[in-house]
Image (cartoon, grey):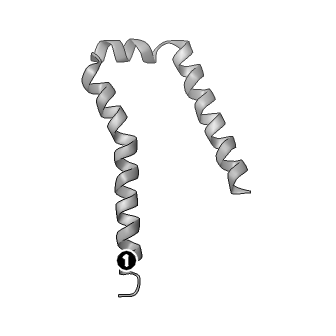
Amino acid sequence: MKHQGFNIAILILSGITVVYIIYPLVTILSFAEPTKILDSLTRPQVWNALIISLVSATISTSVLMF
């Protein structure tokens, strides 16, 4: 019973995080045509941007952990 408030807080924060991540993806997919999305994913610039984002996010998270 003592941890029930904590569990509720974690559940609410987790739900907010999921909405924060899913909402932009749903918005992009609802406004863009599927063929344009597939064409964009085959561009080297898009892959380079994705790799840079993943590397910088990993480095930032690692720095903050220590």
Dot 1 lies on which element? helix
Residue 51, image x and y in percent?
60, 28
Residue at 37% over, 16% down: 38
Q: Is residue 27 left or right of residue 42?
A: left
Vertical relation: 52 (above or below) 61: above
Identify the residue at the far left of this view. 30
Residue 19, image x and y in percent?
34, 46
Q: Residues within 10 Å of mark 1 (few under 14, many from 20)?
A: few
Q: Nearer the viewer, residue 33 or 31?
A: 31
The quarter of the picture where the C terminus appears is: bottom right
Residue at 39% over, 44% down: 20
Quarter occupied by residue 50? top right
**Residue tagged 1:** 5
The quarter of the picture where the N terminus appears is: bottom left
Q: Is residue 26 left or right of residue 63?
A: left
Q: Nearer the viewer, residue 12 or 25?
A: 12
Q: Is residue 14 left or right of residue 44?
A: left
Residue 41, image x and y in percent?
44, 18
Residue at 63% over, 28% down: 52
Amino acid on which disc 1 is placed: Gly
Q: Across the whole image, how many numbered discs are drawn on residues?
A: 1
Residue 33, image x and y in percent?
27, 15
Identify the residue at the far bottom of this view. 1
Quarter occupied by residue 21? top left
Q: Nearer the viewer, residue 48 or 20?
A: 20
Vertical relation: 32 (above or below) 22: above
